[in-house]
Amino acid sequence: MRGLGRSALGVARRFRRAVEDRGGQAMIEYALIVSLIVIVVLVVLIVLGNTVKNTYCNIESAVVSA
């Protein structure tokens, strides 16, 4: 039984250290911000993709005919 008590105490100490550590929380926040930016960029590209494509096609045809 002594080993079990020490083991539970060790787990409790590790859990307390993990809760007190704020470095992991900051990394998760940064990852969420970056993923939000990526989603916004993808949505903008999907929405404006055809407009940009048409603009480049118009420029290309103007250059070729010149």
Image (cartoon, rainbow, N blue to C red):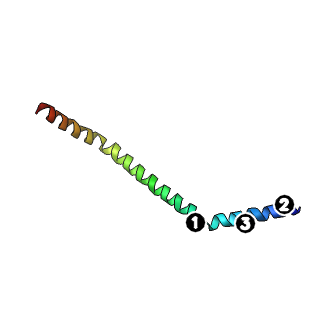
Choose top left, top right, bottom left or bottom right for residue 57. top left
Q: Which residue is mark 3?
A: 13
Query: Sequence order check: which comes first, mark 3 or mark 2?
Result: 2
Report the residue that reaches farthest toward the left.
66
Residue where numbered disc 2 is placed: 4
Which quarter of the picture shows residue 13?
Answer: bottom right
Label 3: few (<14), some (14–19) or many (≥20) C-alpha neighbours in 10 Å = few
Sequence-wise first label, 1 or 2: 2
Q: Is residue 46 above or below residue 65?
A: below
Q: Is residue 5 above or below residue 62?
A: below
Asked if labels 2 and 3 touch by Cβ distance under 8 angstroms, the answer is no
What type is the residue that disc 3 sits on? Arg
Give the mark, 1 or 3, whose residue is nearer the N terminus.
3
Tag shown at residue 22: 1
Amino acid found under the numbered disc labelled 2? Leu
Specify whether 54 is left or right of 1.
Answer: left
In the orientation shown, which residue stands out farthest toward the right? 1
Q: Secondary structure at mark 3?
A: helix
The number of discs equals 3
* Disc 3/disc 2 C-alpha distance (Å): 14 Å
**16 sits left or right of 60 in the view:** right
Q: Position of residue 58 (x, y in %)?
A: 18, 37
Q: Which of these two is toward me, 6 or 46?
A: 6
Question: Under tag 1, what secondary structure?
Answer: loop
* x and y, in percent, of residue 40 in the image: 39, 51
Disc 1 packing (10 Å; few <14; some 14–19; many ≥20): few
